[in-house]
Amino acid sequence: MRHSPASQLPEDKASTYKARVGLILFFVYGLIYAGFVVINTISPETMGESIVFGLNLAVVYGFGLIVLALVLGLIYNSICTRVERFAKETAANTADNEEVAA
């Protein structure tokens, strides 16, 4: 089976910004997860206390971490989509302005 060469993608002018946003969101999640680990390490009996609807803190915190990861992923996607559209529009406007100037 023969494969054709990979298609060349245009340069992503927003990659630096997207990487920075990703790192910020990663550190936010990391700090909240670190809180989970610290509570488990320092006071494991606290995780056994009933919080909501008869569920203990460990279950609520754990599901909260899962939901938070999904929400942060949606936020990241939304921010990156907006930045990519802006970069694409800016590049198109720059090209139009260069054609007018020439």
Image: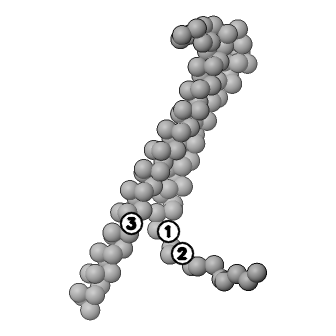
Which residue is at 39% across, 66% downward? 87
* Circles 3 and 1 in contact, beta carbons < 8 Å: yes
Residue 87 drawn above or below residue 5: above
Residue lying at 36% horizontally and 74% vertically, measured from the top left:
91
Amino acid type, residue under disc 2 in the picture: Leu
Q: Nearer the viewer, residue 38 or 54?
A: 54
| Eye-nearest disc, 1 or 2 | 2
Question: How far apart are the two marked residues, 1 and 2, measured between alpha carbons?
Answer: 8 Å
* Mark 2 vs mark 3, CA separation in Å: 15 Å
As shown in the figure, which amino acid type bears the numbered disc 3? Ala
- Viewer-nearest residue: 3 or 27: 3
Instruction: Looking at the image, tell me whether mark 3 or mark 1 is earlier in sequence order.
Output: 1
Report the disc number at residue 12.
Answer: 1
- Disc 2 crowd rating (10 Å Cα; few below 14, some 14-19, many 20+) is few
> Could you tell which of marks 2 and 3 lies nearer the N-terminus?
2
Q: Quadrant of residue 34?
A: top right
Which numbered disc covers residue 9? 2
**Left or right for 96, reference 69:** left
Q: Is residue 59 left or right of residue 76?
A: right
Secondary element type, mark 1 = loop
Disc 1: CA contacts within 10 A as few (<14), some (14-19) or many (>=20): few
